[in-house]
Image (tube, rainbow, N blue to C red):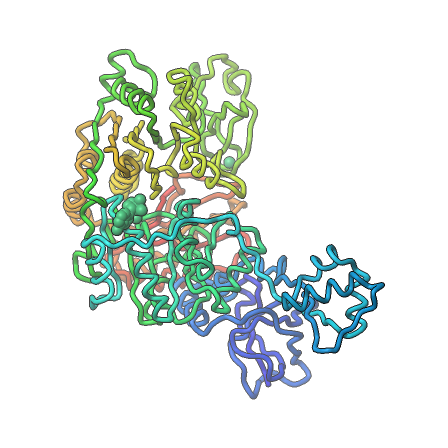
Amino acid sequence: MYAEVIVDIAHSDVDKIFDYRCDETVARGMRVVVPFGRGVTTGFVMRVKGETDVPPEKIRAVLRTEGAPLTEEALMLADVITGRYRVPMALTLRLFLPAEMRTGKTSERYKTVCVPTDAEASFSDRAPRQSALYAFLKERGEGDAAYLRENFGDAALKSLEKKGLIRTEKRRVFRDPYTGVSGENVARELTPAQQNAVDVVKNCDRDVILIHGVTGSGKTEVYLRLIADILEEGKTAIFLVPEISLTPQMLSQLRARFGSRAAILHSGLSAGERFDEWMRLREGTARIAIGARSAVFAPVENVGLIVIDEEHDGSYVSESSPRYVTFDVARLRARYNHCKLVLGSATPSVETYHRAREGEFALVKLPERINARPMPEVHIVDMRREVRRGNATAFSAALRERLKTCLDKGNQAILFLNRRGYSQTVICRDCGYVAVCENCDVSLTYHSDENVLKCHYCGANYKMPPACPQCGGKHLGYVGTGTQRVVTELRKLYPAARILRMDVDTTSGKEGHYRILKQFASREADILVGTQMVAKGHDFPGVTLVGILDADMSLHFSDYRSGERTFQLVTQVAGRSGRAQEPGEVVLQTYDPENYILRFAANYDYEGFYAHEISMRAATMFPPFAKIVRVMVTGEEEKATLAVLKDVYEKLQAIYAEHAEAFLFFNRMHAPIKRIQNKFRYQVLMRLVDSAVLREVYAVCAAQKNKDVLVYVEENPANLS
Ligand code: ADP
Ligand code: ZN
């Protein structure tokens, strides 16, 4: 017999099938170790067959098989993804296995247990330990060898074994990341609106359902009910959330509800834990896969439901190769399994809402908060007036006053701003010099706690220069506000308040944001200051005030989605306020108080926002009415990169010439950030009204074989930097 094997080497040169001789234990989907060149490598079996064209003296044999095979569904998905994004099959197949399984860095864990045999036992009085051990095992049925050795002694264990009274067995153990996690299992009675949402999902004739529910409307409860019902039917479920939403509260809620039937995959797990959670899903002992975007590849079979919570979240688009879109993969899986795909959000992306309105998706609304709690009132504050009054701090008088009231009442507050670090950049007030990263061509950010300048793209640290490197002047100053500066100002204003800061700098490491969110949830702090991360779906009952310090920041990006993003951010962060008994408030500080996006957000008017936005997109021909496609060409060698760019550009130009009617725009240029991590970045930017030519664009990029220059395609990129 022969196996067709894709070797696990992510290079297009070896992206083809190799034949190996094998025996009947080898089957499609298995991972195998095979000789390759002068070494050995792992690979995936795509097919087993009776004959081969490879001459017998040339064919080599599979050395051994490894681990759990991929499912038939995984192989089908890999095929589609490889075809669509034109990436090597080996790279795509990697998506379906946890990295630690592929690299063999961790593996299954076993323990040894002792079990009494049926042999007749008798002990002399001089062996009390042996008889005690034997009695213990007879009573319990079995015992962990390490435990027995410690409590009864190694000698006793060995003697019993020699006499044939006990035998040892190897048992598989699963590392449980949630041993310390507990929570109350409160399956609540659904509100009529929630029940309606459940009914629509189950009974509608669409395969995709969008649940548009305001913040605090109880979407989570709807998902959990749907999942519980699917389990009852003997099927499995996939529940996707942004990584940041996997908070300690969420984990304990899921754990309490589903126990060990749920496998929760998140970045805080150790390699061994992730391995075991994956295995539990593959073997079917766990039947709900919960996790961030990569959990869409979970090895569950017979899927009955897929949920994508906070569907608008940018984290659902993978930024590293292969660049898959979570929704697309989820929809493929839903079709394969004939199951429903549920999208949920308080602020659906304009494209998703458009598809729902056009009838492609079913649409169901949860228009009110649970218990008809009011949405927090939003006060728009004109910061230009504050400046005119001589207030140079990050806090308006209105915000300071409300913050005081909030703290006096013993409530909690969240302060949101778009930037991190102490201040944005360092500039020379004499010559205008701006400190930039040597690798990335972006300005550096000053971090006062470490007294260094940091590059937020590559992480490089630089010493703060004593004088301007350009003119020697001594007037180096900072511009902009950051989380650190806000914390410093807060400490002065409210010395008694306990303050937590949450941004990329404070959330690195294994514990990451969990620790901070846990502290805030258990009310070990009064004020949480943070960037985007605090805006996600957290449910803190103690929060009655939210301050948005700089609502304008995201309005001024040169990106067609900046309006949408601002609306989402403001709505989401406002939604953290007043979720329990006491009503909440929001103070929104802006230099542009008449801005229509902010007005819609302050009035919780999603429909108004959408109507405005969609008509603008239609008039200017932006998504969903056209597709923005960017081909990135990046490499360390500028000359080689430019040569590849030229080649790619010429081939794309030929497509453009042939199908001009499909293009609204076509041009090559520097990417807005010209260099990141020492790699030069060039782009060919296109706007397409007809996506049919996309196949050809992918083909052009896939045909590039220069090892040192990376070429890839982005569709409607989340970020055009
Ligand atoms: P969303 O995800 O829509 O923002 P959540 O699911 O976090 O909202 O629910 C908001 C709050 O309402 C939570 O504290 C949740 O425990 C509570 N809740 C949800 N459904 C019910 C219900 N049917 N009865 C009582 N409380 C509920
Ligand atoms: Zn850098």
**Does residue 156 appear to the left or right of 196 in the view shown?**
right
The picture places residue 521, in percent across and down from the top left corner, at 40, 37
The quarter holding residue 101 reads bottom right
The picture places residue 487, in percent across and down from the top left corner, at 42, 23
| Front residue of this view, candidates 371 and 60 | 371
The picture places residue 435, in percent across and down from the top left corner, at 48, 26
| Front residue of this view, candidates 83 and 162 | 162
Is residue 656 depicted above or below 721 in this figure?
Answer: below
Residue at position x 28%, y 35% in the image: 577
| Front residue of this view, candidates 314 and 107 | 107
Q: Quadrant of the C terminus?
A: top left
The picture places residue 179, in percent across and down from the top left corner, at 53, 51
Residue at position x 22%, y 66% in the image: 206
Residue 715 visible in the picture: yes
Pick out the residue farthest to the right: 126
Residue at position x 29%, y 33% in the image: 556
Is residue 358 depicted above or below 583 in this figure?
Answer: below
Pick out the residue farthest to the bottom: 50
Residue 686 visible in the picture: no
Q: Quadrant of the N terminus?
A: bottom right
Is residue 589 depicted above or below 650 in this figure?
Answer: above
Q: How many marks?
A: 0
Is residue 253 depicted above or below 164 in this figure?
Answer: above
| Front residue of this view, candidates 290 and 140 | 140
The quarter holding residue 518 reads top left
